[in-house]
């Protein structure tokens, strides 16, 4: 059974840093392209960063140079390191496989709030 559990969100001041974790079960990170997504209030969920099965990473323009996605296959974990956080980064952050095929697996997400 696929499960995705996000953690690490917090309230931080602008310019601060956070590390989000996503522990997965029911599948191997070697087999699925993974992404971190975020959803701000009243806005659609958008991909922030992604990492392919081969370890290739891509980023949304607004987070390039500030966010880093990584994974440890043995630990079944995907991370999102975030630095120089801005108020516009405030959102609920989720990890998941590629939509729409993985839409049924969205977890609870983790709240990131950046104060100015």
Image (cartoon, rainbow, N blue to C red):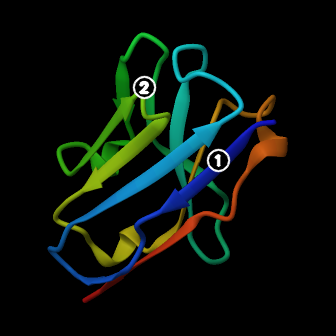
Which residue is drawn at the image coordinates 52% and 37% (left, top)? 35
Q: Of residues 75 and 35, which is closer to you in this image? A: 75
Instruction: Using the numbered discs, state the Cα–Cα distance from disc 2 to disc 1 in whole angstroms.
Output: 15 Å
Quarter-wise, where is residue 102 in the image?
top right
What quarter of the picture does the N terminus occupy?
Answer: top right
Compared to 2, does 40 lie above or below? below
On residue 74, the disc is 2
Q: Of residues 17 and 47, which is closer to you in this image? A: 17
Give how far across and how far down residue 37 sits, in percent: 54, 50
Q: Which residue is mark 1?
A: 4
Label 1 Cα crowd, 10 Å radius (few <14 / some 14-19 / many 20+): many
On the picture, is 72 further left or further right than 18? right
On the picture, is 42 further left or further right than 55? right
2 and 1 marks in contact (CB < 8 Å): no
Quarter-wise, where is residue 113 in the image?
bottom left
Give how far across and how far down residue 86 sits, in percent: 27, 72
Which residue is drawn at the image coordinates 37% and 32% (left, top)? 71
Which label lies toward us, 2 or 1? 2
On residue 52, the disc is none
């Amino acid at each position: 059974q696929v499960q995705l559990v996000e953690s690490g969100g917090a309230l931080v001041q602008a310019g601060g840093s956070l590390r989000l974790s996503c522990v997965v079960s029911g599948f191997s990170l070697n087999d699925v392209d993974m992404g971190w997504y975020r959803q701000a209030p009243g806005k659609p969920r958008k991909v922030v960063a992604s990492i392919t099965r081969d370890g290739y990473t891509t980023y949304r323009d607004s987070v390039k140079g500030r966010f880093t996605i990584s994974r440890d296959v043995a630990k079944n974990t995907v991370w999102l390191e975030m630095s120089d956080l801005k108020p516009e980064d405030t959102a609920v952050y989720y990890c998941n496989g590629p939509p729409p095929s993985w839409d049924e697996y969205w977890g609870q997400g983790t709240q990131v709030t950046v104060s100015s």
